[in-house]
Image (cartoon, rainbow, N blue to C red):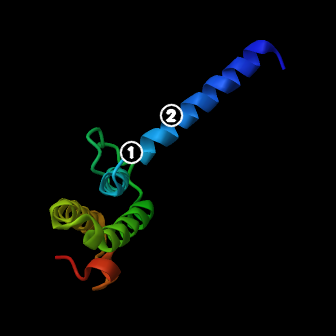
Amino acid sequence: MNENHVHDLAEQNDEADEALRDISEVAAVEIITSACVHLMSAAAVKVGLAEDEETGQYQDLAEARKLITSLAGLVTAAAPEIGNEHARSLRDGLRSLQLAFAEALPFPDDPGQAPGEKYTGRVS
């Protein structure tokens, strides 16, 4: 190994240590909320709600179903832990995604079979 390569590895290790320290200082509610926001954003794109969505190239309802169901499970499980003030906005976003998904379907899902409904109950 040359000296530059060793220096680069040391720099990467320092950055990893700094990132680890940073995450240790983040509250659980922030991490959970951030994960939910990432799932919501990805699901919105897959449902076809992207701002530049005119061609349908981003829409993938099978992927959206997985993301929405995962989000519903996380929101339902996390709600008692993060408190109503945080859970309320996550539930609202989840419900909006579930309704957008239902509108995007060519044929409706059977009652209770829509994404996330096993965790949230029927959405209408």
Q: CA distance from mark 2 to mark 1?
A: 11 Å
Tell which of 38 and 109 is nearer to you.
38
Secondary structure found at label 1: loop
Secondary structure found at label 2: helix
Q: Residue at x 28, y 64 (%)?
A: 101
Residue 46 appears in the figure: no
Question: How many other residues sit within 10 Å of disc 1, few (<14), some (14-19) or many (≥20)?
Answer: few
- Residue 25 image label: 1
Residue 82 percent across, percent down from the top left: 26, 64
Amino acid carrying mark 2 in the image = Glu
Residue 16 appears in the figure: yes
Q: Would residue 1 appear left or right of 75 to someone viewing this image?
A: right
Q: Quadrant of residue 90?
A: bottom left
Tell which of 119 and 111 is nearer to you.
119
Tell which of 48 and 95 is nearer to you.
95
Residue positioned most to the right? 1
Q: Quadrant of residue 3?
A: top right
Residue under circle 2?
18
Quarter placement of the C terminus: bottom left
Q: Residue at x 56, y 36 (%)?
A: 17
